[in-house]
Image (spheres, grey):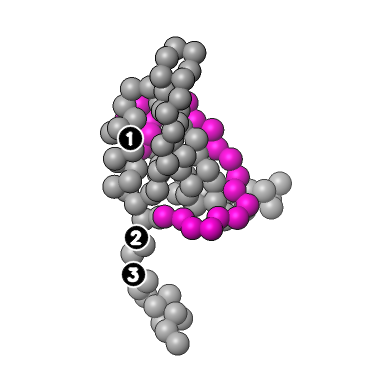
Amino acid sequence: MVGIRIEKWLAFGHIMLRVISREHYKAMIETIRNAGYGVTVFHGEGKGGPVVELYIVCRRRDSKEVLNIIHNIEPEAFYITEHVGDVSKIYRPILQPVTGWRAILKKK
């Protein structure tokens, strides 16, 4: 139990979010890309008509931020998360420069 709790808190690794949207997908794509994440778009057909499926690969610790963006734009959007083993390339927001004691330890 403790190990599972610690692993969830550390949130190492990557996940893939599959988001299915009907209406506000253009705003969602633009906002997610402006936040620094890569988005791949697929057009498809759902039960109620045309839909757009967005694939977003991000770090597990960033998933809450991406999901907040999605829910703020389209609360009714359907999403699925999948754990990703290996990733060849990932886009992520530009990190803040390292400061404090971390900067000292990073110098070689």
- The kind of residue tagged 2 is Ile
Element on which disc 2 rests: loop
Is 24 displayed left or right of 6 in the figure? left
Residue found at the very far top of the displayed protein: 48
Q: Which residues are magenta?
A: 69-91
Between disc 3 and disc 1, the foreground one is 1
Q: Secondary structure at mark 1?
A: helix
Q: Amino acid at mark 3?
A: Pro
Give how far across and how far down residue 36 sits, in percent. 34, 51
Residue 94 tag number: 2
Residue annotated with mark 3? 97
Name the residue tied to disc 1: 28
Disc 2 to disc 1, C-alpha distance: 19 Å
Q: Specify whether residue 73 is painted magenta.
A: yes
Residue for point 44% across, 33% down: 42
Q: Residues within 10 Å of mark 1 (few under 14, many from 20)?
A: many
Q: Give SS at disc 3.
A: loop
Residue at (71%, 46%) from the top-left corner?
1
Residue 30 horizontal/vertical position (percent): 29, 40
Q: How many angstroms separate mark 2 from mark 3 (CA)?
A: 9 Å
Q: Sequence-wise, which precedes: disc 2 or disc 1?
A: 1
Q: Is residue 72 visible?
A: no
Question: Which of the marked residues, 3 or 1, is nearer the chain's N terminus?
Answer: 1
